[in-house]
Image (tube, rainbow, N blue to C red):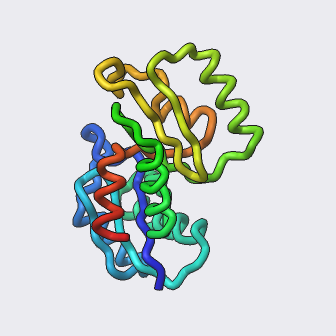
Amino acid sequence: MTTYVAFLRAINLGATRKFPRAAIVAATEAAGFDGVATHINTGNVRLDTAMRSRARIESALEAAYRAEAGFEVPTIAFTAAELAAVAVVADALDHHGRHYVSLLKAEPTAATLAALEEAIGAAGVDGERVHVEGRAAHLLLAEGESQYHTAKLSNAFLERHLGVATNRNVTVVRTLVRKWC
């Protein structure tokens, strides 16, 4: 069995996308996963499985969540080791401002990363930068100068250039690693 951490995108935002923790656990277990646990109500799910294909795991979860919640729930899964590596990169960046991590469904190609760099240059961002490594894009905002809701480098910006992603504060990522990895 391998431990995965699945990140659900865009749940519990507003009145129409409610997906309570108990329903997430029930749907995950009904899809055949074991050791299911959640952390806070933003769609962080721990599970164990013998499945080896991340794509199959994500597809099974998305089908179960669609059936339970009644709407699409894009899901991004990382093994415990992969998530721990994201936290190691975050620590190595040693950023003391606001730090968010966009977890990507697919690893970007070199061409995609080059296009992202071009788009960042065109956006004219000050006090903001992004560091992409594997399927994680670290959004680094200057302390006190940039607020996430006004930042030009946001999860929405990254999704336009890198595909499906969901965003977590680096503190949540580190907590999940300590708790589940």
Residue drawn at point x = 37 percent, y = 20 percent: 150
Residue 12: percent from the left, percent from the top?
A: 28, 46
Q: Is residue 126 above or below residue 181?
A: above
Q: Residue furthest right?
A: 111
Q: 133 left or right of 77?
A: right
Q: Is residue 66 above or below residue 162?
A: below
Residue drawn at point x = 35 percent, y = 63 percent: 177
Q: Is residue 82 above or below residue 1?
A: above
Residue drawn at point x = 24 percent, y = 61 percent: 21
Residue 157: percent from the left, percent from the top?
A: 53, 29
Residue drawn at point x = 36 percent, y = 21 percent: 146
In this view of the protein, can residue 62 be seen by the observer? no
Name the image quarter holding residue 40. bottom left
Residue 162: percent from the left, percent from the top?
A: 62, 40
Residue 155: percent from the left, percent from the top?
A: 47, 35
Q: Nearer the viewer, residue 23 or 175?
A: 175
Q: Nearer the viewer, residue 70 or 25?
A: 25
In this view of the protein, can residue 143 be seen by the observer? yes
Q: Is residue 32 above or below residue 70?
A: below
Count of picture labels: 0
